Image (cartoon, rainbow, N blue to C red):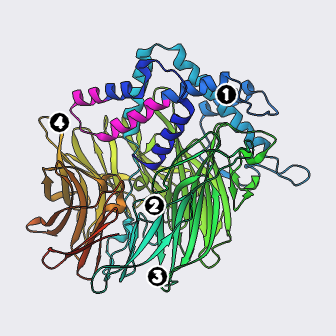
């Protein structure tokens, strides 16, 4: 289960622990119903069941919030009544959104006559959300159980198509042939945090408890030589290495013990390793970025830190700046006269109204907060912005941050996806530009910036579309009604060509000519059994697909599948070779692209796979004539809630899972040593 889903379920549990819910609406009952439907359809898609459980739990939350509202929680006041605001929100949502809209100071929140921030407009959005939420929750009490379960099932199936995987940038077709591996990232030139990294000699490993980063010297035998420890009430999520600057930046979650409204100290719950498990009503989470000097790995030193409201969402590092994202959920304990109860903060200062981007519809209760921090000045913020939202996803190109959120109707159908773009350079963030498309975006690999245009593959109802948007986020080209009754599973762009996979019964791999952004056109498509939900360019004219094989007769997945596509002729793409791992029922690469170790120059394809006997690490090579060769299949002895990582230094492969590091020779693939942290 992903972190954001865990956070949602944690909140649900806290809000509804004293609420009695009809048995038919309990999460386990709804999820059981979804699983039964999944079995009847013959698909072994765990994402459907996971999303179904989350949505089922959300039904319980709806009941809880309804009762909480009836108990008279004070949400403050507004210049307009909630009915009027709700009507405005409904009207805005029904009429659509402008294809082009710049959200600068005039479109975002303005200051009052005294030049001070009053945040009244933002508060009206929150009130509208609360009012609409009550109306939606009331529908569940008015409808029959059978109808409620039907909506739950439909929503779960829809969510199964909106997964959070992404893939490395299209421009990295030529793998960097270095002496050590780096984190597999979405966009070449834009680094991403991870739980394991190396500088070519030392391994930096986040321990399973999230409290320490161990520094391991690989020269000679493996030996732990240093440690970076987070402060109490913090848990490290991931970290960055800047070898040139001899710095390590880690990102941690912090849990405050007081809120502006409720001054009493709240009770915190930790396990024996001081991992935060939960809290009483009113606790707020913050995200912290801490920069450390690692010039002497045996004695790392803290240099500075910054904090911002919300739980850790994501981050990027480019040009010596960290761009930190967090998701701040307003919650129920708010007061319209106290901005600190509903406005996010950075380094304990409220984000200015002019720096908050508002959506085109008056609805929302969350913010995506982004802060730029120079690693040269780790205690200062270079710039900050916030995006007011109902929840969305991120894609970060080399020049811009794209935040996209989908608006769904009551039937679980995607009406449209609103996209907001914030430019970034040298720590400075520009005002947001806004546009929209019909349908939903599968993942961040289905959205790609190239020569100032944004190319998107989206699922629209029971078909799919390709869009090209200009720098003002206005649609200038499109292809519609592709692959009826199928949905996008993965995509990949390279220069003027795009590739995407849809799936229902077979795996059509489409190639798209985008050389004329005003007139994109389909070049060809290849239909084969199964599907690829991760695509990666592999040397010249090769595209690697990782996904699942599907039995054409039984229509069930029967093993992880590797495909190598020949894309030398993009009008006639061919599956050159394939390999099906019959005893492997899933791989985390399908959900976490950082778990993939791929280097075409060294001919390495590494991934962890789940088998009935436990998790194993596989290492493959590829030959144009003979196809895939499995050089290594070894049991992973570490146990972790995170996906295992494979990385190399010179001729040694290190497999890291939890607190266990295992080393293998890349010459004969035999194990050489291991270390327990």
Question: Which residue sits furthest left?
Answer: 626
Choose mark 3 or mark 1, whichever is in front.
3
Q: How many labels does the image show?
A: 4
The residues bearing labels 2 and 3 have C-alpha atoms spaced at a distance of 22 Å
Above or below: residue 633 compared with residue 356: below
How many residues crowd around disc 1 within 10 Å: few (fewer than 14), some, or many (20 or more)? some
What is the magenta range?
Answer: 35-58
* Residue 105 seen in render: no
Mark 4 secondary-structure assignment:
loop
**Whole-percent x, y for residue 220 in the image:** 27, 86
**Which residue, given by chain and number where applicable, does mark 3 sit on?**
243
Q: What element carries label 3?
A: loop
Identify the residue at the far front of this view: 272
Residue 28 x %, y % = 37, 28
Pick the front one: 502 or 67? 67
Q: Does the magenta stretch include residue 489?
A: no
Contact? badges 4 and 3 (CB < 8 Å): no
Query: Residue under circle 4?
Result: 555
Calculate the distance from the C-alpha at mark 3 to the C-alpha at mark 1.
Answer: 51 Å
Residue 379 relative to residue 672: left or right: right
Q: 94 or 197: which is nearer to us?
A: 197
């Amino acid at each position: 289960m992903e972190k954001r889903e865990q956070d949602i379920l944690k909140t649900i549990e806290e809000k509804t622990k004293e609420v009695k819910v009809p048995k038919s609406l309990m999460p386990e009952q709804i999820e059981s119903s979804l699983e039964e439907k999944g079995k009847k359809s013959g698909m072994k898609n765990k994402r459907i069941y996971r999303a179904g459980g989350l949505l089922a739990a959300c039904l319980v939350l709806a009941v809880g919030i309804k009762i909480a509202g009836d108990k008279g929680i004070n949400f403050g006041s507004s210049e307009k009544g909630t009915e009027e605001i709700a009507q405005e929100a409904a009207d805005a949502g029904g009429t659509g959104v402008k294809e082009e809209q710049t959200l600068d100071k005039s479109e975002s929140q303005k200051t009052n006559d005294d030049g001070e921030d009053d945040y009244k407009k933002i508060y009206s959005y929150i009130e509208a959300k609360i009012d609409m939420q009550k109306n939606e929750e009331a529908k569940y009490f008015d409808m029959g159980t059978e109808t409620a379960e039907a909506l739950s099932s439909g929503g779960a199936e829809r969510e199964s198509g909106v997964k959070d995987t992404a893939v490395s940038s299209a421009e990295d077709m030529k793998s960097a042939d270095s002496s050590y591996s780096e984190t597999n990232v979405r966009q070449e030139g834009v680094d991403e945090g991870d739980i394991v990294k190396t500088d070519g000699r030392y391994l930096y490993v986040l321990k399973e408890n999230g409290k320490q980063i161990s520094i391991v010297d690989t020269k000679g035998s493996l030996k732990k030589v240093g440690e970076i420890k987070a402060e109490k009430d913090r848990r490290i999520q991931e970290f960055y290495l800047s070898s040139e600057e001899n710095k390590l930046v880690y990102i941690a979650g912090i849990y405050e013990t007081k809120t502006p409204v409720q001054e009493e100290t709240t009770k915190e719950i930790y396990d024996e390793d001081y991992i935060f498990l939960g809290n009483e009503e009113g606790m707020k989470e913050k995200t912290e970025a801490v920069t450390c000097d690692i010039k002497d790995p045996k004695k790392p030193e803290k240099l500075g830190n910054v904090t911002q409201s919300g739980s850790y969402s994501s981050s990027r590092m480019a040009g010596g700046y960290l761009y930190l994202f967090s998701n701040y959920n307003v919650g129920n304990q708010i007061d319209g006269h106290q901005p600190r109860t509903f406005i996010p903060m950075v380094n304990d200062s409220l984000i200015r109204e002019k720096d908050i981007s508002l959506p085109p519809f008056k609805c929302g209760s969350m913010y995506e907060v982004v802060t730029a921090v120079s690693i040269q000045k780790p205690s200062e913020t270079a710039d900050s912005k916030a995006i007011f939202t109902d929840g969305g996803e991120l894609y970060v190109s080399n020049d811009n941050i794209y935040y996209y959120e989908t608006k769904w109707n009551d039937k679980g159908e995607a009406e449209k996806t609103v996209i907001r773009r914030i430019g970034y350079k040298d720590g400075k963030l520009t005002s947001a530009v806004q546009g929209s498309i019909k349908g939903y975006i599968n993942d961040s690999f289905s959205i790609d910036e190239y020569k100032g245009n944004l190319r998107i593959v989206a699922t629209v109802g029971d078909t799919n579309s390709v869009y090209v948007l200009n720098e003002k986020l206005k649609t200038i080209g499109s292809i519609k009604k592709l692959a009826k009754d199928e949905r996008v599973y993965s995509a990949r762009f390279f220069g003027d060509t795009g590739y995407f996979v849809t799936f229902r019964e077979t795996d059509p791999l489409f190639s798209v000519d985008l050389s004329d952004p005003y007139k994109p056109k389909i070049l060809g498509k290849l239909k084969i059994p199964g599907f690829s939900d991760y695509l990666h360019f592999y040397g010249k004219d090769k595209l690697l697909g990782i996904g699942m094989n599907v039995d054409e007769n039984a229509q069930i997945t029967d093993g992880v599948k590797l495909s190598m596509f020949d894309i030398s002729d993009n009008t006639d793409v061919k599956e050159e070779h394939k390999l099906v791992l019959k005893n492997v029922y899933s791989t985390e690469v399908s959900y976490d692209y950082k778990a993939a170790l791929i280097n075409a120059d060294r001919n390495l394809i590494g991934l962890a796979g789940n088998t009935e006997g436990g998790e194993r690490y596989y290492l493959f090579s590829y030959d144009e004539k003979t196809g895939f060769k499995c050089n290594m299949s070894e049991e992973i002895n570490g146990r972790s809630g995170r996906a295992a990582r494979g990385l190399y230094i010179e001729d040694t492969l290190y497999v890291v899972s939890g607190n266990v590091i295992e080393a293998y020779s890349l010459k004969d693939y035999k194990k050489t040593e291991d270390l327990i942290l």
